[in-house]
Amino acid sequence: MKKSVGEKLKECRGQRQWSQQELADKLHVTRQAVSNWERNKTLPDVYTLKEIAAVFDMTLDEYMEDARQAEVKMPKTPGRIVGATFALIVLYLIAGGMSDRLMVELVMEMVIISVFCQGFVHLCLSYSVKSGNFTGLAGFDSKVEYRVEEVKKVLIQMDMHICAVSFGVVLLLGVCALLGEREAEIVSICAMLSYVLDYTLAICLYNYRGIERTMVREKDQKMAKAGYVSLIWFMGWIFFVCAGIAVKMALRSIENNSPQATGMLGWLFLSLLVTVAELFFEQYRVKKIIGADGKYRPGKAFWISTVLTAGLVAVMLLA
């Protein structure tokens, strides 16, 4: 029976009667790294595997001959939560239709969350975990060397979070049917804004926390971390603009598809132009500066775009 990479490493170390610290010294890594490898908590990259094989006087093929990597599989729980979310919507449609408390806007919000934000994302992440193909995921760079199994673990954590939160928000929207029309509108707006904030922050947080585990080269890790400065700035402003539009429409009772609502979309478009331009420019600066072994700091364009976006938001809210 084939052994896992960790079991193979522990076996070879035992045959040499080396401690974890002695092996770590030979590989120029920490003892904790060796411990994590042996427990299959993390996996050494291909360059380190070559060094490990050389330490044990083997070729890489000889070392890996009877070893296998512990395969990471997508659990069934996220799919079951997706199914439960769809079931909630069906129950709401039935109960709402029988009680004459069916709210079309709530149904639309439920469908957007369950189909696009939860179901579609679950299918994409499940495919990536099963196939090991990450080219369809945002942020994937073919020039970066990844630890495939670690990337899969991050995607599973992300999928579990998104599915669980989506189910909770759909359930909350269903409860809104028990409230008055005005109260239901306020609760649904707060729920959707909170959902969007949690959704975006969760994806960023899981990605950021997994940078060192998923990326092999240190320079790629530095680029990814530095790039999060402008990325979080971009997402923060987009959320702030959308929240401002939602609050203004609720307080002033502005109806959808009205001239006022269309006008606010124009302000949103202008804000997007500024923030997207700044995001791409800062991401370019990150690669240029880190690539030259420098230290990234936000440039003048970052602060100029911040002032412009703040001005656009202020005019939009006061208009």
Image (cartoon, helix red, strand yellow):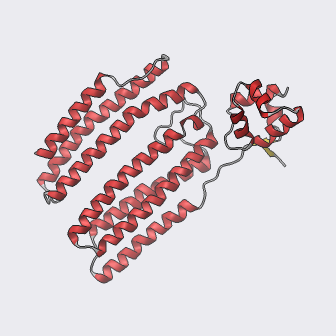
Q: Is residue 25 left or right of residue 133?
A: right
Find residue 233 and report its image quarter.
top left
Q: Is residue 299 left or right of residue 82?
A: left
- Using the image, determine if residue 257 lies above or below residue 97: above
Image quarter (top left, top right, bottom left or bottom right) of the C terminus: top left
Residue at image coords 71%, 44%: 40
Find residue 52 and report its image quarter.
top right
Q: Is residue 198 left or right of residue 253?
A: right
- Using the image, determine if residue 43 lies above or below residue 124: above
Find residue 147 and report its horizontal and vertical position in percent: 62, 37
Residue at image coords 59%, 61%: 76
Find residue 261 and report its horizontal and vertical position in percent: 16, 53
**Residue 136 visible somewhere in the drawing:** no
Residue at image coords 41%, 46%: 201
Q: How many marks?
A: 0
Residue at image coords 27%, 71%: 103
Q: Is residue 84 left or right of residue 29?
A: left
Q: Nearer the viewer, residue 119 or 201?
A: 201
Find residue 318 and report its horizontal and vertical position in percent: 12, 45
In the picture as drawn, the residue positioned furthest to the bottom comes out as: 98
Find residue 253 and report its horizontal and vertical position in percent: 14, 60
**Residue 252 visible somewhere in the drawing:** yes
